[in-house]
């Protein structure tokens, strides 16, 4: 059986909106701009130029409320984990830390599912080996206010399938993009909740 085909959707969006009381401000849907989506070649910030590599995941930053007002996530926003799993690695990225979580889900080729949460500030007690239930908060969004590159605070999510023998403790963003044995997939296909892509 190909589990990649039956992988159920994560309630990530539901957990995130509830933990951060976004429903109190009338959360309606996520807003994505070109550049935030999976495999998009361009940046959505600054001059909007070409990225060094096509986008390896999905960026969550903006949402719209029921009254049509736009909001952005702030540095206090807590990030939940997409599925139950175990933290296997924490590395740096250009805006903060990336948290790597292994899940007990395999595809028919024996590849294992990992989710990665980028540009974060991990919570106290979030460390390698920590076992997580679906929706457990793992980190806050990294504060980008003091960075030289002016990028709004946001969380980047990647979903990858890796061979069982892959040395995940050495994972970094270069390997995720360049390594042939890494299979990226589009997180938007596995995350529940409404969204809209705007130009
Ligand atoms: Zn991103």
Image: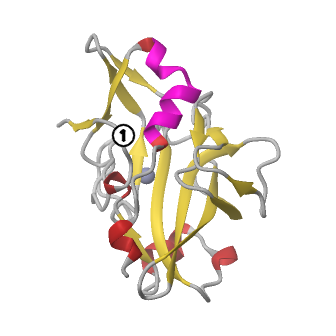
25 versus 113 height, above or below? above
* Disc 1 secondary structure class: loop
> Which residue sits at x=33%, y=64%?
54
Q: Position of residue 101 (x, y in %)?
A: 62, 62
Identify the image quadrant of the C terminus: top left
Residue drawn at the location 42% of the way across and 40% of the way down: 60
Residue 122 in sight in this render: yes
Q: Nearer the viewer, residue 74 or 125?
A: 125
Tell me if residue 192 comes above or below residue 23 in the rendering: below
Q: Nearer the viewer, residue 102 or 152?
A: 102
**Quarter of the figure that contains the N terminus:** bottom left
From the viewer's perspective, tell me whether residue 130 is left or right of residue 35.
right
Neighbour tally class for label 1: few under 14, some 14-19, many 20 plus, Cα within 10 Å: few
**For the view shown, which residue lies furthest in the top direction?**
67
The magenta stretch spans residue 22: yes
| The one of 148 and 61 positioned closer to us in this rendering | 61
**Which residue is disc 1 drawn over?**
46
């Amino acid at each position: 059986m190909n589990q990649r085909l039956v992988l159920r959707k994560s309630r990530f969006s539901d957990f995130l909106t509830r933990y951060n009381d976004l429903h109190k401000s009338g959360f309606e849907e996520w807003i994505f701009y070109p550049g935030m989506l999976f495999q998009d070649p361009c940046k959505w910030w600054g001059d909007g130029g070409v990225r060094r590599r096509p986008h390896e995941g999905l960026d969550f930053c903006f949402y719209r409320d029921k009254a049509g007002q736009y909001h952005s996530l702030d540095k206090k926003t807590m990030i939940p984990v997409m599925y139950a799993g175990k933290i296997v690695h924490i590395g740096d990225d250009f805006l903060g830390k990336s948290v790597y979580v292994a899940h007990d889900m395999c595809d028919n080729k024996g590849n294992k599912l990992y989710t990665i949460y980028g540009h974060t500030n991990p919570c106290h007690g979030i460390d390698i080996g920590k076992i997580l239930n679906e929706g457990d908060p793992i980190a806050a969004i990294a504060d980008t206010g003091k960075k030289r590159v002016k990028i709004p605070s946001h969380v980047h999510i990647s979903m990858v399938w890796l061979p069982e023998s892959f040395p995940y403790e050495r994972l970094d963003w270069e390997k995720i993009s360049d390594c042939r044995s890494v299979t990226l997939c589009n997180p938007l296909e596995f995350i529940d909740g409404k969204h809209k892509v705007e130009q």
